[in-house]
Amino acid sequence: MSETKELTYKEVESHSGKKDLYVVVHDKVYDATSFVDEHPGGEEVLLDVGGQDATEAFEDVGHSDEAREILDGLLIGPLKRLPGDPVPSATSVNSIPSTGKSDSAGLGVGLYALVFAGALVAFGAYKYLQMQSESKK
C-alpha cells in the first residue's frame, strides 16, 4: 500500500473478525486479513489479538526478519492515540523494531571487565603479601 491512513484505536477495534482483521504493532496499524490463513502460528493467534495492540504478542514470539517484511507489506498507517485509549504495555513502549541483537553482549564485556579487575586486585594482594613476607626475613 503506497498511501497510508491514520486510524484511531476505536476504528481499529471494529476490525477484529477473520474477514476484516486489523492489528496494531508498535503504534502502526496493519491489515492482517489477507494473512490470517497463511500465518504459520495458525489463525487463532491473529484472531486473539485482532482489533487491538498486538505489540507484546508479536515481540514475545521473536518474529524473523522475513515476518517483519511481511508485516511491512500489510501496513495501513500510524495509530492515532487518543485520551482514554488503552496504554501499551511496558514491553511495547519501545517502538524501535528489534535488530536481532541482544543486550547480553554488553553483559559479556562487563563480566570480562569485572573478572579482569578481580584478577588485578588478587595479583596486587599477592604481591603485597609477598613483599610483607620478604621484609620479615
Image (spheres, rainbow, N blue to C red):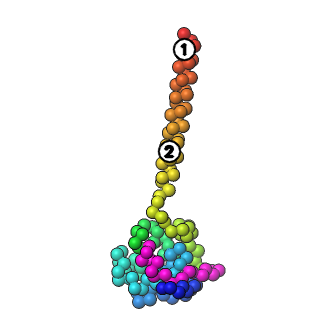
Query: Sequence order check: which comes first, mark 2 or mark 1?
Result: 2
**Which amino acid type is shown beneath numbered disc 2?**
Leu
Q: CA distance from mark 2 to mark 1?
A: 35 Å
In this view, the residue in front, 88 or 26, is 26
- Residue 107's spot in the image, x, y percent? 50, 50
How busy is the neighbourhood of tag 2: few (under 14 within 10 Å), some, or many (20 plus)? Answer: few
- Residue 76's spot in the image, x, y percent? 51, 84
Report the side of 6 relative to 71 (left or right): right
Q: Quadrant of the C terminus?
A: top right
**Residue 101 in the image: above or below residue 5:** above
**Residue 38 in the image: above or below residue 128:** below
Residue 96 tag number: none
**Residue 11 in the image: above or below residue 86:** below
Q: Secondary structure at mark 1?
A: helix
**Which amino acid type is shown beneath numbered disc 1?**
Glu
Magenta-colored span: 68-84
For disc 2, the marked residue is: 111
Residue 134 tag number: 1
